[in-house]
Image (spheres, helix red, strand yellow):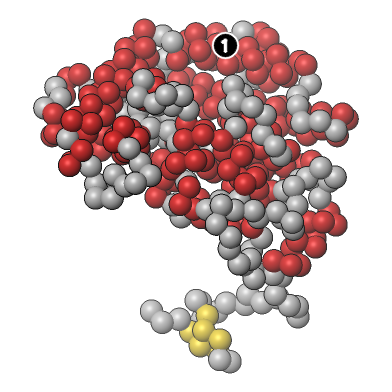
Amino acid sequence: MRGHEVDSVVRAHADSRAAVGPGSVVGRQVREEREAALLRPGATLARGAGNRERDERPDDERTCFERDRDRIVHSTAFRRLAGKTQVVVYPSDHQRTRLTHALEVAQVATSIARGIGVNIALTEAIALGHDCGHGPGGHASEDAFDAYLPGGYDHGPWGADVVLTDLNLCRETQDGIRNHSWSRPAPGTVEGEIVSWADRIAYCAHDLEDAAHAGIVDLDELPAEVTAVCGRSRREQLSVFIRSIIGTVAEHDRVGMAAEPAAALAALRAFNYERIYTRPDSLAQSRAVVEVLTALVDFYLDHPDRLPAGSLDSNCDRVHAAVGYVAGMTDRYAFATAVELIGWDRDRLPQGIDRQ
């Protein structure tokens, strides 16, 4: 179908009444002016930001952080998150992937950012990109790659400084992605700190939900310290934690959470670690991930000619290239490659996307 032309305008629907009143294009400069007028003091403004490794001409329509968000969404690394398991021990049709996790973190983070009046576009860009440095097979991939790199493998810096470097993201976006984990230095922006909280809130709530759906945990076993504050359901938990951060910022002007819900979040995370992440089946799956990914890296170190063309250049040594290539694989591709290239026993493969 070619659409329906009415008064020199082609419409998708012949009966469309979609129209707005008179006005001009709301371009970048107008949006930057609105940010300066409406955002809370301490928020990161797009005007005056946008410092990138390689200078670029500003876009006429989008702010610098909106461009970052769009680049991340359209990137190969972001798309591959759909094929990477969030928690490898209970793959099912209902499980979260790294992609759905990133989307949920973005929802939580932008809800907080909107509620306290800071930069939503920057918050969303950091949230969507925060896990692009993860390898296949869940967090165990970091253990697999650690031994090959002098400073170890951390998905935050790897995502910001390796995986997404070709996107030429703004410094503020890179910083938020690099330092979203609580074990890292604090992000340099309010928006980055919000994503740090949103990541923890989202994975604590949705990993519990996935595990309950898989029959691994019973929600009635949650400690009272959790249920008395934020209930048993993901919806209740997200609502309480999001509202707590917004309320805490309103009262104290600092990004954080009130003591009682913060203790409930910590108790929920501890419950997940004991009952989900470190249960015997989970640890066995993690060991299987480490074994197969280590074997793949070793294969490419011994056979660098099997790496994709251009992987080895003047700025990338063999180890970095091998780790980077394996880290970029989806679960299915990594496991299939191990079977095809090195004869890996299928019975030794971990669970993952499309493998149960």
Q: Percent from the top left, x then y, of residue 194?
A: 68, 35
- Mark 1 crowdedness (10 Å alpha carbons): few <14, some 14-19, many ≥20: some
Seen from the viewer's position, the closer of residues 259 and 129 is 129
Seen from the viewer's position, the closer of residues 240 and 329 is 329
Q: Quadrant of the C terminus?
A: top left
Seen from the viewer's position, the closer of residues 5 and 75 is 75
Q: Based on the displayed image, in which of its 4 quarters is residue 123 positioned?
A: top right
Q: Percent from the top left, x then y, of residue 218?
A: 49, 13
The amino acid at mark 1 is: Ala
Q: Is residue 40 visible?
A: yes
The residue sitting at 66% across, 37% down in the picture is: 192
Q: Is residue 93 visible?
A: no
Looking at the image, which residue sits at the far front?
Answer: 314
The residue sitting at 85% across, 57% down in the picture is: 37
Q: Percent from the top left, x then y, of residue 239?
A: 69, 31
The residue sitting at 62% across, 38% down in the picture is: 176
- Report the label total: 1
Up-down relation of residue 64 to residue 4 (above or below)? above
Question: Where is mark 1, residue-wise?
Answer: 270
Q: With 212 as the anchor, is 36 left or right in this view?
A: right
Q: Based on the displayed image, in which of its 4 quarters is residue 346 positioned?
A: top left
Q: Percent from the top left, x then y, of residue 315?
A: 38, 44
The residue sitting at 70% across, 53% down in the picture is: 49
Up-down relation of residue 249 to residue 79 (above or below)? above
